[in-house]
C-alpha cells in the first residue's frame, strides 16, 4: 500500500501490539453498544467498515469529528485493517456530510474507499450499513464477522489511532446536546462529567418542565437523573418538553405497554413491513410478536425466539404503528424472559424484500413524524476550555464484566492512569482517570475523583 504523507507518520506496531494497545486503552464501541474493541480486532476478515452514518437524527458528533480529524480517522482505519488482515477499508457516510467527504477524499489510500449512504433511517444500524456498503447480509443472531466484516464507529477508530500511536487511553467523550436548550452544541468532556454540567454548558433547558433522553430520539433511553455521568458510549443529551410524545412513551410502564398491545392492535402488519431486519430477510415479524401477547397459544416457539434478533431501532413504534403500540417494548420484554431462560435463536435468512430500499424512512420525514421540527438544531462543535470539579467513573461502561478497582480513597491519580482493570480472562475494558485529582469514593459500581 502507498500512503499519502498528508496522513502523518504511521506507527509500525504489529497486529499483536495493536490489539494489546487497544485493550490497555479501554476502547469500546462508541456507537452505543460498548463492545470491547480489542476483541473485534482479533478477528480475521477482509473488510474493515467505519460506520460514519450517524443514525440518530439529532446527534451531530461523527459528522463534525470527521472533517476535523480526517487524517487520524484514516490512520485508525489502517491500523484496524492491519490488525484484522482486512484488504479493504470502507468509510460509510451520508452524502450530506460534504465537509467530511471533502476532507477525507484527498487522503484516501487505494485500499480505503468512501461509500455514500442515503439519508434514511436506520442507515447507521450495523447490519443495515453492512448491507448497504457491501451487499452482504448478516444472518439473524450472527456477528458481522460471519460475512467477513468488522464494524467500528468513528470515535472508536479515532481512539484506536491514539492508542496505537500515543498509547493513550480513553478519557474523553464527544457528545451532542440538542433540543430545547439555549445553545445546542457538540462538545468534548472528560468521562464521568455529570449530564447536569453538560446541560449547563449548553445554557440550560428552555422549557419549564423538561424531559431528558440519554442518546438520540429513536434508541435513546429516558433519563431519570441529570447526575448520570457521561460514559464511553454516551452519544448525546436530548432535551424536550415532558409532554412531548417521545418522553411520554418512555414514561409508560411495562404493564401499560402490554395492555395497549392487547387491546388496540389492528393487525395491519405495518410494523413488520417497515422493520429493517425483516426487510433484509430476517425472520423477525413484529406483528406476530404483538399478536402473541394476545394469543399466546398460537405463538410458536420459533416466532417468540425471533424477538432475540430485534435491534430495537424503534421504527415499529415511532413510525409504523398507527395506534400507539410499541412492538419494540414487547420484543424487549420477551428478550429479557428468553435470555433469563438461556434461549438462543437459530433461524433462516430469507431473501431480502425487493422493496427494502424504498421502505427505509427519510430523515426529514422522520423528524416530522417524531414532532421534532421545532427542536431540531444544528448543534455546532465548540471547543470549551472547562474541567469538572469531580468525575464519577462507572466501572461498567461496556458489554461484559465490570472493571475491578485498583486504587483506594485518598490516592492521587493523573489523567490517563488506570484506576480499574480488566478482570483476568474476562470480557471487559479497563477504566482510566479522566482528570488529575484525588480518589474520594470507591464502590463496586463507580470511582469518584475530585480535581486538585
Image (tube, rainbow, N blue to C red):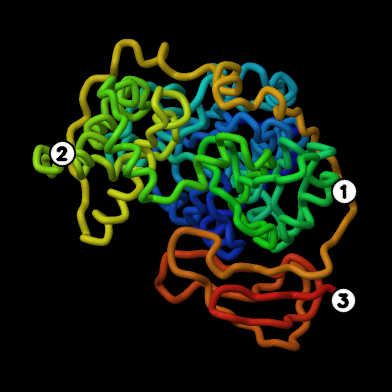
Dividing the image into 4 quarters, which one contains the C terminus? bottom right
Frontmost of labels 3 and 2 is: 2
Q: Secondary structure at mark 3?
A: loop
Whole-percent x, y for residue 163 in the image: 65, 56
Crowd tier of the residue under label 2, counting other residues whose Cα lies within 10 Å: few below 14, some 14–19, many 20 or above: few
- Residue at 29%, 35% (x, y): give it: 263
Residue, disc 3: 452
- Front-most of residues 435 and 217: 217
Crowd tier of the residue under label 1, counting other residues whose Cα lies within 10 Å: few below 14, some 14–19, many 20 or above: few
- Residue at 62%, 43% (x, y): give it: 76
- The answer to whether 217 appears left or right of 145 in the picture is right
Whole-percent x, y for residue 224 in the image: 60, 56
Say the numbered circle drawn on residue 384. Answer: 1
- The first of marks 3 and 1 along the sequence is 1
Whole-percent x, y for residue 138 in the image: 32, 33
Rounded to the nearest whole Å, what is the CA distance between mark 3 and mark 1?
19 Å
- Front-most of residues 435 and 333: 333
Amino acid at each position: 500500500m502507498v500512503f499519502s504523507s498528508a496522513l502523518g507518520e504511521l506507527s509500525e506496531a504489529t497486529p499483536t501490539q495493536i490489539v494489546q494497545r487497544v485493550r490497555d486503552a479501554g476502547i469500546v464501541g462508541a456507537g452505543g453498544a460498548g463492545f470491547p474493541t480489542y476483541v473485534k480486532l482479533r478477528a480475521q476478515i477482509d473488510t474493515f467498515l467505519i460506520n460514519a452514518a450517524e443514525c440518530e437524527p439529532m446527534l451531530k458528533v461523527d459528522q463534525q469529528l470527521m472533517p476535523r480529524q480526517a487524517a487520524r480517522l484514516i490512520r485508525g482505519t489502517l491500523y484496524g485493517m492491519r490488525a484484522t488482515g482486512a484488504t479493504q477499508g470502507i468509510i460509510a457516510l451520508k452524502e450530506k456530510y460534504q465537509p467530511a467527504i471533502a476532507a477525507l477524499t484527498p487522503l484516501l489510500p487505494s485500499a480505503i474507499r468512501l461509500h455514500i449512504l442515503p439519508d434514511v433511517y436506520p442507515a447507521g444500524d450495523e447490519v443495515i450499513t453492512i448491507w448497504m456498503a457491501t451487499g452482504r447480509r448478516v444472518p439473524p443472531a450472527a456477528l458481522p464477522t460471519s460475512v467477513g466484516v468488522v464494524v467500528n464507529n468513528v470515535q472508536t477508530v479515532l481512539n484506536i489511532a491514539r492508542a496505537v500511536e500515543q498509547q493513550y487511553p480513553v478519557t474523553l467523550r464527544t457528545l451532542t446536546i440538542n433540543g430545547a436548550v439555549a445553545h445546542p452544541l457538540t462538545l468534548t468532556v472528560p468521562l464521568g462529567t455529570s449530564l447536569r454540567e453538560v446541560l449547563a454548558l449548553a445554557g440550560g433547558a428552555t422549557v419549564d418542565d423538561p424531559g431528558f433522553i440519554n442518546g438520540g430520539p429513536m434508541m435513546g433511553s429516558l433519563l431519570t437523573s441529570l447526575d448520570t455521568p457521561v460514559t464511553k458510549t454516551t452519544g448525546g443529551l436530548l432535551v424536550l418538553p415532558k409532554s412531548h410524545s417521545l418522553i411520554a412513551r418512555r414514561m409508560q410502564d411495562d404493564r401499560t405497554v402490554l395492555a395497549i398491545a392487547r387491546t388496540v392492535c389492528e393487525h395491519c402488519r405495518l410494523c413488520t413491513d417497515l422493520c429493517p431486519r425483516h426487510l433484509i430477510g430476517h425472520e423477525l415479524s413484529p406483528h406476530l410478536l404483538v399478536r402473541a401477547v394476545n394469543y399466546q397459544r398460537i405463538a410458536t416457539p420459533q416466532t417468540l425466539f425471533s424477538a432475540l434478533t430485534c435491534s430495537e431501532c424503534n421504527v415499529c413504534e415511532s413510525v409504523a404503528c398507527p395506534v400507539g403500540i410499541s412492538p419494540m417494548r414487547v420484543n424487549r420484554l420477551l428478550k429479557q424472559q428468553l435470555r433469563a431462560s438461556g434461549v438462543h435463536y437459530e433461524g433462516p435468512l430469507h431473501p431480502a424484500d425487493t422493496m427494502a430500499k424504498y421502505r427505509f424512512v427519510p430523515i426529514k420525514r422522520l423528524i416530522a413524524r417524531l414532532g421534532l421540527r421545532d427542536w431540531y438544531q444544528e448543534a455546532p462543535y465548540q471547543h470549551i476550555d472547562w474541567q469538572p470539579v469531580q468525575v464519577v467513573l462507572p466501572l461498567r461502561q461496556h458489554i461484559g464484566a465490570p472493571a475491578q478497582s485498583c486504587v483506594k480513597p485518598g490516592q492521587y491519580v493523573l489523567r490517563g492512569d488506570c484506576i480499574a482493570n480488566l478482570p483476568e480472562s474476562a470480557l471487559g475494558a479497563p477504566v482510566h482517570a479522566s482528570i488529575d485529582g484525588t480518589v474520594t469514593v470507591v464502590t463496586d459500581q463507580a470511582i469518584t475523583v475530585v480535581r486538585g
